[in-house]
Image: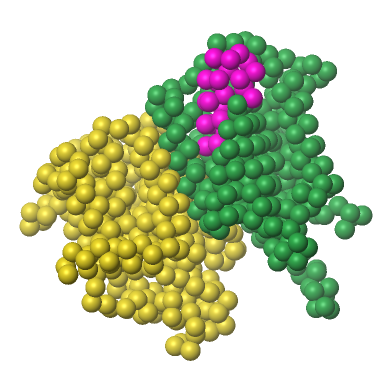
Chain colours: A yellow, B green
Amino acid sequence: MSSFPIGDRGPSSMPASQRPPVILIVTALLFGLAALAVPRFGTLGNIENVLRIAAILGIVACGQAIVVILAGIEFSFGASAALASVVIVMALPTTGVVGAFLLGSLLILGVGMVNGLLVARFSVPPVIATLGMLMIASGLAAWLAGGLPIDAPPSDAFSFPARGRVLGIPVPILCAAAAFAVLHLLLAKTRLGRGWYLVGANATAARLAGLSVPRLVFSGYAVAGLFCALGAVILTSRVASGQPMLAPNLPFETIAACAVGGLPLGGGRGNVLQVACGVLIVAMLNNIVVLLNLPTAYQLILLGTLVIGAVLLQRDWAFLGNAVRLLTNGRRG
Amino acid sequence: MNQVIAPRLLVAPAGIIAAGLIFAAIAPGFLSLGNAASIAGQAWVLVLLATGQMFALAARGFDISVGAIAALAGTLAAMAANSFGLAGLIVAPLVGLACGTLNGWLVGRLALQPIVATLGSLVALKGIALLVSDDGQAVPLTEAGQATSLAFDPVLGLPPLAWLALACVLGAQFLLSHATLGKRILMLGANPEAVGLVGADAGALQIRAYQLCGLFAGLAGALMTARAGAGLPTEGAGMELQAIAAAIIGGTALSGGVANAIAVAAGAFFVQVVLTGLNLTGVSPFLAQVTVGLVILGSGLMDTALRSLLTRNRQPKDVSP
């Protein structure tokens, strides 16, 4: 496998360097600047708030990252999360809390598998497949719920995924940490992950190397669905209701997080640290818009500019990296 | 090539007939003149959006921002019409053109992937539309009566704005079949390298394709505003999907290089027939949305099937250099 030139673009070529990666510095700089310039940003309560929001975003972004590494794109996350939330709340009286969460998760896994099947077996472009599934899932969610949110009967078990604490740490943050760990293991340590990188970098080469491209693509979308399922369970528990319009911007935010983290949307590259930093940047910026009392429309404008700007920067990343390095070295020296 | 009508172009008319027959059997009022007129009246917004999308697809691109462009253009046009009179609606195509230029510049000059560029502008334009309209409030036209009469009262059989839309579709088809620009855009989609060999600037062609797409989206926005008698900043979500589906059903190849504006208009009419038919049969609008999703998936599958079918037939030709 090492004879493939694309191997150079894989994860192994990212040097385990002594200096911290650029994206980490950028994230830290943004945090520092916001803490200095934005009132109330640096308070402990707000930081926990940012982390809670970043946690849900991060879990789903893990799924998006897999799809992006496969040179695909996934638009149906928000709609399938909404469908799951409606189904979870409707199933609650009959199946109990655990059963309902399980059912919702299976549903999202199913949506991911259908996406995978369409993309992998029938070579439907990922945009068309996932946008089509977005329409179907959000239509079904609205139909099931009658167009309006349905309240869930409050219970401790139901609110545990969003509001519970284990050892003093909020459960969503623990879940996010676990999701990032799983993604890291998948991408860096398993044949599955290596296969995803190869397919994303060059599907033809991967096929010629004897990999089953359709199977790898299918599994990627299915695993992405599992990550989204975990996010959807926490989201549903957080809003304590079945909402047909649960998280319409979730796909955009996760794509933005991947792009900001430096994952090329053409596929083939990317690691967990990049995804995590991208997620933190998006969450911090959204939080800053709220703290500055700007209309939430600015979040959308910022998000759109961020996607385009980040992808443009990726090409001149080296320039920005050098600038940041110069800056940090200058401070140390 | 032109002696035989490509099988792609027959899908939409066949679909319209099939859907018409099915709904005629289920819904009693479907095959009435009034209903046909209502479908014909409603379809034009989608026709314009799909025709614009066709240019982006033909150049091997993609524009998922057309719904957002139409909403923003329609809203700004309503504001302009309120201050300068109904002629202010002309702002809509201009806004569309500007948005299209931005998309085209991002794709053609900065070499962004079409999805990334238009996703970014989709989200950002949505935000701008919310911002200018005080968080999504509709902007009612002061001269709503005049505007709706432009959109609804027939002159010589069609409302004036429908005539305009029809003229735009015919213009688009003329551009594709007779103008250098249209042929070059098709060429760009069929074989990007060939464009350079004949001395054309691929980036400039991409910019033109997205400009046309934006322009048509802006026109659709003006039509939406005139029909509703108000600028609707949150309208148009999901329209980009219907437009893409209509363009594909209308025979536009996702792999670029094949496009016919009249067939695309037929594709848009097919989508409208399905939507109106479902409405008449009393299906919940949410399930109609599900059906649109299925139509989109179906159009994607159709494109794959047609591509593999056509390349299989063409294989012997490709072998000889």
- Over which residues does the magenta segment extend? B66-90
Left or right: A150 in relation to A75:
left
Q: Whole-percent x and y of residue B316?
A: 82, 75
Q: What residue is at 24 percent from the left and 73 percent from the top? A: A19
Q: Whole-percent x and y of residue B180?
A: 80, 50
Q: In front here: A140 or B240?
A: B240
Residue B61 found in image quarter = bottom right
Q: In front here: B217 or A204?
A: B217
Left or right: A60 in relation to B313:
left
Q: What residue is at 65 percent from the left and 18 percent from the top? A: B87
Which residue, as the protein is rendered here, is positioned at the far bottom? A3
Q: What residue is at 18 percent from the left and 64 percent from the top? A: A331
Residue B31 located within the stretch drawn in magenta: no
Residue A260 found in image quarter = bottom left
Image quadrant containing the C terminus of chain A: bottom left
Predominant secondary structure in magenta?
helix
Residue A93 found in image quarter = top left
Q: In front here: B171 or A22?
A: A22
Left or right: B197 in relation to A257:
right
Which residue, as the protein is rendered here, is positioned at the far left? A167
Residue A59: tell me if it is visible: no
Q: Whole-percent x and y of residue B109?
A: 58, 55
